[in-house]
Amino acid sequence: MIELYSWPTGNGRRASIMLEESGLPYAVHAMDLSTKVQKQPWYLELAPHGRIPVIIDYDGGDRIVLFESGAILIYLAEKAGRLLPVAPAARAETLKWLFFATSNLSPLAMQVHRLTRLQASGRQNKSLNGSREELIILYRIMDRTLANRDFLAGDYSIADIAAYPWVYRHKLQEIQITPYPNLLAWMTRIGARPAVQRGMNTPPRSDGM
Ligand SMILES: N[C@@H](CCC(=O)N[C@@H](CS)C(=O)NCC(=O)O)C(=O)O
């Protein structure tokens, strides 16, 4: 059994979608971030930066603790033998787009969310527009890539699972994605998967964001 500590945010949903896709049995521990439970000493033992998601896998007597959503995706894909190809060329393509999502897309999207919230609370900040423009450039890159393939790395993979929950929240970033038809079609394709729908709502979230 795998224990998942998470909350339905962009990074948390990567882990829950992958668990749903993998079919591996797991139990969820809801970490309501507004309560700061993620900064309590027991949790810092698991994740020293006090952030979700975390998984603990009790595998054959070992207790394997993982933080960092990208590492969790690779670990679960290898354990389940799904969504990370073994053949070198396809694996390289998948890892490239996975790291595009974890190193570029999510840090920037998180920054845009934070600055958008600050601006809404009346605090002006000069870097918001620049950060949003950079994020739009990433959306354009994805849109261009998806003109020739259905999924970021060709076949559906952990790269899509890493990117989807962040693009899903484009309204929070105050970015329209209608100008990016291939990205929109990709969103629809992924959002139609039952495992994605379950993972997006684990733990449950009522506001649809
Ligand atoms: N690089 C980490 C980032 C994790 C992260 O920033 N998680 C956010 C939610 S999306 C969080 O736990 N925020 C709460 C906090 O910083 O106190 C990953 O990919 O797992």
Image: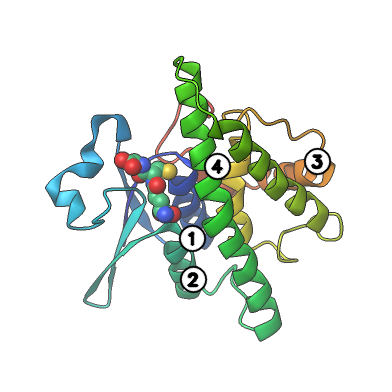
Residue 16 or 105: which is nearer the viewer?
105
Q: Quadrant of residue 204?
A: top left
SS at circle 3 = loop
Q: CA distance from mark 2 to mark 3?
A: 33 Å
In this picture, is 135 found above or below 68?
above
Residue 79 or 51: which is nearer the viewer?
51
Q: Earlier in the sequence, mark 2 or mark 1?
A: 1
Badge 3 is on which residue?
A: 180
Q: Earlier in the sequence, mark 1 or mark 4?
A: 1
Q: Earlier in the sequence, mark 3 or mark 1?
A: 1
Q: CA distance from mark 3 to mark 1?
A: 32 Å
Query: Mark 2, mark 1: which one is toward the viewer?
Result: 2
Query: In the picture provided, is 40 more to the left or to the right than 25?
Result: left
SS at circle 2 = helix
**Residue type indicated by callout 3:** Tyr
Residue 179, given in percent of the width and then of the height, sits at 82, 35
In this picture, is 205 found above or below 25?
above
**Residue type indicated by callout 1:** Gly
Residue 104, given in percent of the width and then of the height, sits at 57, 55
Badge 4 is on which residue?
A: 109
SS at circle 1 = loop
Q: Are marks 3 and 1 in contact (CB under 8 Å)?
A: no
Q: Are marks 2 and 1 in contact (CB under 8 Å)?
A: yes
Q: Are marks 4 and 2 in contact (CB under 8 Å)?
A: no
Q: Earlier in the sequence, mark 4 or mark 2?
A: 2
In this picture, is 32 found above or below 100?
above
Query: Mark 3, mark 1: which one is toward the viewer?
Result: 3
Going 20% across and 50% down the picture, which residue do you hit? Answer: 43
Badge 2 is on which residue?
A: 80
Q: Earlier in the sequence, mark 2 or mark 3?
A: 2
